[in-house]
Image (cartoon, rainbow, N blue to C red):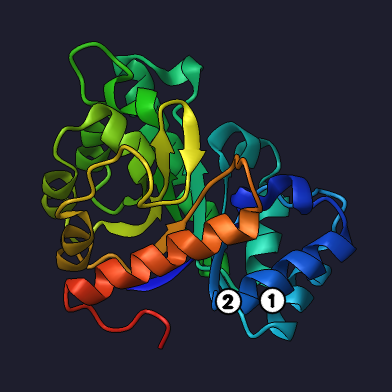
Amino acid sequence: MKIGIQVSSLKPLLLTESQVKDAFAKMRALGCRTVQLQWIGPSVPREAIAGALRENGMESVSVQDFYETVLENFTYYVNLNAVTGGTWLCVSRIPERLKSREGLDGFAAELRAMQRKLDPFGQRVCFHPVTGDFTAVPGIPAVDYLLEALPELSLCLDLYHLNRCCGDMPGFLRRYAGRVCMVHFKDSRGESLVPAGQGDTVWTGVVGACLDAGVSYAFVEQEHWQRDPYECLKEAMDWLRGEIAACGGEPPWK
């Protein structure tokens, strides 16, 4: 399982081309070689983002944004993923217009249609549920419903959201072994986000379950910080490296 950074963690520091270059160099200095792209300023040229990755010997495996945002700007996201070498186009959050039993069927159909559009580019769609998506429709666990309706659908699991609505994170991961392509390690203390491993989240068994479930990528994420964001990301990555090593996993920096 490779570890890296979800660059949404640095959103206010990614508004210009020079900021992107600086941020990517600093992430590489932390030992980060793999990223998931999100919320880079729209005025930053795609080629500049790809150049910053190349200059620092880093890879992007995915571009992510809200489903409705991707739908409205599909060409931009597909091209960004293509030029930066990503495989996964990750869409998050079930739209309010589809939060009904019929709506979930419609959402499944829309995701299938999106995959057909991605096929010529060699890209794959994956779904990032947020807290409300796990119980979006009364009586229907929405994520379970989608995974049953779309056997080909993979998940990008944000463990912060999963933890808020699922008392058994390891059990959920193992239940969908082989279908979780990446996870986000995000933590909180009270209402504040903190580096992964420093908050209220009980992480017992989670990293081991990720390894058992065949998760390929684990990204640390922290969109809000009370101190230097790079220090926060370094501490989260160091903690995650230690957890993987303790589980007997292959060193993720190799």
Looking at marks 2 and 1 on the same chain, the residue that comes earlier in the sequence is marked by 1
Residue under the image location 32 percent in, 83 percent down:
251
Q: Nearer the viewer, residue 138 or 36?
A: 36
Q: Residue 150 versus residue 25: which sits nearer the camera?
A: 25
Viewer-nearest residue: 117 or 15: 15
Q: Are marks 2 and 1 in contact (CB under 8 Å)?
A: yes
Q: Which residue is at a point 37% across and 39% down the rendered structure image?
A: 160
- The amino acid on which the numbered mark 1 sits, given as a three-letter code, is Leu
- Read off the residue under disc 2: 59
Secondary structure under tag 2 reads: strand
Q: Position of residue 100 (x, y in %)?
A: 34, 14
Residue identified by numbered label 1: 53
Which label belongs to residue 167?
none
Judge left or right: residue 203 versus residue 227.
left
Vertical position of residue 182 compared to residue 127: above or below: below
Q: Identify the image quadrant of the N terminus.
A: bottom left
Residue extending furthest top?
138
In the picture, measured across the screen, residue 92 lies left or right of residue 148, that is: right
Q: Amino acid at mark 2?
A: Glu
Q: Relative to 185, is 21 above or below?
A: below
In the displayed structure, would residue 245 be above or below residue 157? below
Residue 162 found in image quarter: top left
Where residue 28 sits in the image (x, y, percent)? 63, 77
* Residue 184, image x, y percentages: 41, 52
Mark 2–mark 1 distance (CA, rounded to whole Å): 6 Å
x 66%, y 46%: residue: 74
Q: Residue at x 48, y 43 (%)?
A: 194
- Asked which quadrant contains residue 218, the reply is bottom left
**Image quadrant where residue 147 sits:** top left
> How would you rate the neighbour count of disc 2 (Cα within 10 Å): few for under 14, some for 14-19, many for 20 or more?
some
